[in-house]
Image (spheres, helix red, strand yellow):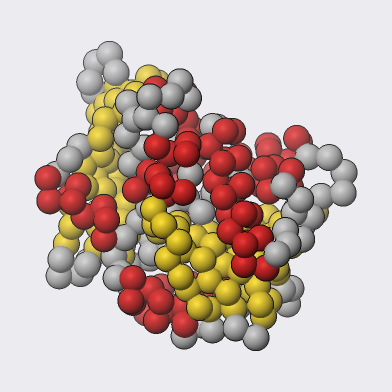
Amino acid sequence: MEQFNIPEHYDVMADLDRDVHDDIELSRSEAALAVSLIQESTGSIPRSVFLPCFGTGRHIVPLFKLGVKKITGVDLSATCIKKALTHLTRLNGGNIVQLTLADLRSWYTNEEFDAVLLLGNSFADIIDPSQLTLFTAGMLRSLKSGGVFVMDYIGERYLERCRTARQSTWHAVLNGVPVLDCRVPKYDSEHRVLQIDVRVEALETHELVWTGFYQKLILTPTELIQRFGARSVELQHIGLADELNPYYSAVDSKHPLHAIHGGDLGMLQESDWWVGRKMK
């Protein structure tokens, strides 16, 4: 099965999904949830955090404001990193940030971190199980013994949308053009891959502006626990995103993101949150 081009996809999403990336309240709520889960596990705020697949870096400033002192991030998208660097102008002195364009499957550091946060439903973008094993190893290698891993993951829960072919349509802007962003999910049961087909049309003329797709390898909870256990991380399911974070479920709120999406936040709203601690 064809693997979608991850860096090219996120280069486009940095612009097309700007309503998500620029929503400061959303980013604050996710960062606060992640840090609270770490505190519940360790009793303290992590001083150093590794952000694999940090995207546009929208969680960096909120994490520092919550007490994190040092952040290291790795991402495949040059466009996302460029946008992430703009967030750093909002930081005060004393914060340490290092952002790198690299592939986690081959990236290596001698540093160790108190926590690893994988947010934005980035896990299982790589649909080849053996390559996903390399990605997972690269992501967890630098987590300290006793350190905490937190992620959101869109697993089996989203498959109901595939069965009904439920389309999500949002108003957006791409390359300065007002557009309709239409996304339809489907599921390949043979390869166990969720695929979202994206069609972007000009709002006024309905001419095609961009088309693409992205994917997630769908693993069962048992498979996730075994996969992370093989890397000495005891993974536990914490709960559903819209039950843990009030922002996701505030359908009737006046938050800009909810207004734009009509209460349908897609994968953000329907992901599962997981926490794991690296065994000593």
- In the image, 232 versus 134, the foreground residue is 232
How many marks are shown on the rendered structure?
Answer: 0
Instruction: Decide if residue 114 is on the left or right side of residue 57.
Output: right
| Quadrant for the C terminus in the image | bottom right
* Residue 228 image offset from top left, x and y in percent: 46, 77
Instruction: Decide if residue 216 is on the left or right side of residue 207.
Output: right
Residue placed at 29% from the left, 44% from the top? Answer: 212
Q: Quadrant of residue 85?
A: top right
Is residue 31 visible from the viewing direction of this image?
Answer: yes
Residue placed at 38% from the left, 24% from the top? Answer: 252
- In the image, 105 versus 64, the foreground residue is 64
Does 84 sit above or below residue 90?
below
| Quadrant for the N terminus in the image | bottom left
- In the image, 51 versus 154, the foreground residue is 154
* Residue 9 image offset from top left, x and y in percent: 40, 48
Q: Quadrant of residue 183?
A: top left
* Residue 126 image offset from top left, x and y in percent: 38, 65
Residue placed at 24% from the left, 15% from the top? Answer: 205
Is residue 173 visible from the viewing direction of this image?
Answer: no
* Residue 223 image offset from top left, x and y in percent: 33, 77
Instruction: Decide if residue 156 is on the left or right side of residue 151.
Output: left
Residue placed at 56% from the left, 41% from the top? Answer: 29
Considering every residue shown, the one lying at the far right of the view is 93
Considering every residue shown, the one lying at the far top of the view is 204
Instruction: Decide if residue 116 is on the left or right side of residue 4.
Output: right
Q: Quadrant of residue 232?
A: bottom right
Does 48 sit above or below residue 249?
below
